[in-house]
Image: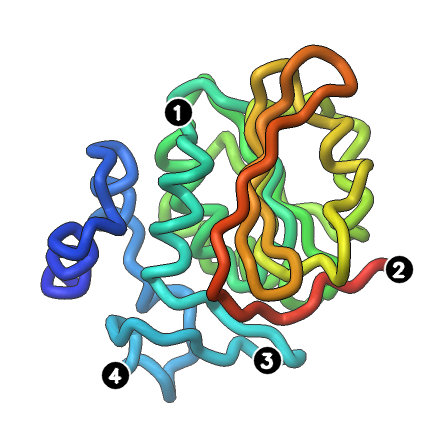
Amino acid sequence: MEQLIENLIKSGYLKTPEIISAFYEIDRAGFISEKLKNEAYANIPLPIGYGQTISQPLTVAFMLELLQPAKGDKILDVGSGSGWQSSLLAHIAGEKGKVFAIERISELSELGKNNSKKYGFKNLKFIIGDGSAGYEKEAPYDKIIVAAAASEKIPSALKKQLKIGGRLVIPAKNSIWLVVKGKEGEYAEKEFPGFVFVPLIAE
């Protein structure tokens, strides 16, 4: 694990102390199946069942650095999978923050909840639902991050659920997009090409 993190730091993917600390504290090995444990620290995506994957560490690091989660943030994590990224976010947001982890596959939501239990987070809630529509009940959010690729365009529901100044990091096609909300209805968007994700499926 230490070697993986050191490589991500050396190659410039991990930079922020709080995100680096979360990578050390939240062990990726605890979020994959027993038979894949020997690949826990390989910089590759791994299957978690139901046609889904746990993203490669490099991609998670890159997206979290774009997102810039901070203590006290209210964060929506769309496509929580086995719970690794949700737990990283909960660690960073701290006691005064909140993380809502939404997943449409109920078995994976349960898996994520069970995997995160060992850390005793009081600020992390797992929800079963259609993440492409966000989670209106707790909006607006400081940060929103999505673990699956939108087909063509970024869902407008997610953009609307951002606070002013809030950040959304989402894959679309083969790029990762950073969206920053200005005043109501205004968004700055930046594209980072060259990534592959499982598709974001709406109900």
Give the quarter of the image for residue 125.
top right
- Whole-percent x, y for residue 138 in the image: 73, 26
Residue under the point 60% across and 35% down? 189
- Please tell me which of labels 2 and 1 falls first in the chain: 1
Name above or below for residue 132 compared with residue 173: above
- Badge 3 is on which residue? 49
- Please tell me which of labels 2 and 3 falls first in the chain: 3
Give the SS element for disc 2.
loop
- Please tell me which of labels 1 and 4 falls first in the chain: 4
Marks 2, 3: nearer the viewer: 2
Q: CA distance from mark 4 to mark 3?
A: 17 Å
Marks 3, 1: nearer the viewer: 1
Q: CA distance from mark 2 to mark 1?
A: 31 Å
- Please tell me which of labels 3 and 1 falls first in the chain: 3
Q: CA distance from mark 3 to mark 1?
A: 31 Å
- Badge 4 is on which residue? 38
Marks 1, 4: nearer the viewer: 1
- Please tell me which of labels 4 and 3 falls first in the chain: 4
Tag 1: amino acid: Ala
Q: Is residue 10 left or right of residue 44?
A: left
Q: Is residue 127 left or right of residue 176?
A: right
- Badge 1 is on which residue? 70
Q: CA distance from mark 1 to mark 4?
A: 32 Å
- Please tell me which of labels 2 and 4 falls first in the chain: 4
